Amino acid sequence: MQKINVSEFKAICLRLLEQIRQTGQPIEVLKNGEPLVVVYPPISTKKRKKSFGVLRSSINGTVGDLIEPVDDFNWDAISK
């Protein structure tokens, strides 16, 4: 992973972002020699579209009324 100081990153930011997009390799930005942030390339749109609706078939339908109480249990807080 390429490492670069924040002042240098600031000076050539657009060029570095294009480099990340083309190569797919992240860049670690340092401030005073300490890691500040790691810039990663975006996830491809193909992968994002695949995850949308992935749990759609996991719901088999509702059982019973969703609004009604599950049990006819008398809570102590209600009776006081």
Image (cartoon, rainbow, N blue to C red):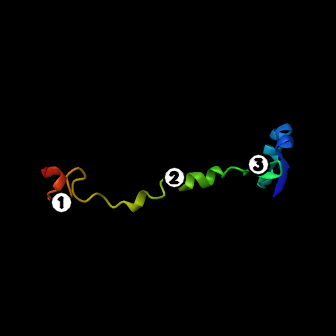
Q: Which residue is mark 2?
A: 52
Q: Image height check: is 1 above or below 22?
A: below
Q: How many marks?
A: 3
Cα distance, mark 1 to mark 3? 56 Å
Cα distance, mark 3 to mark 2? 23 Å
Q: Which residue is mark 1?
A: 71
Residue 48 marker: none
Q: Is residue 55 left or right of residue 64?
A: right
Which residue is at a point 82% across and 39% down the rendered structure image?
A: 10
Please name the amino acid that badge 3 sits on.
Answer: Arg
Please name the amino acid that badge 2 sits on.
Answer: Phe
Q: Image height check: is 54 above or below 4?
A: below
Q: Are marks 3 and 2 in contact (CB under 8 Å)?
A: no
Which residue is at a point 78% across and 44% down the rendered structure image?
A: 17
Quadrant where the N terminus sits is: bottom right
Q: Which residue is mark 3?
A: 21
Cα distance, mark 1 to mark 2? 35 Å
Q: Earlier in the sequence, mark 1 or mark 3?
A: 3
Closest to the camera, between mark 1 and mark 2, is 1
Q: Earlier in the sequence, mark 1 or mark 2?
A: 2
**Mark 1: which secondary structure?**
loop
Q: Is residue 76 left or right of residue 6?
A: left
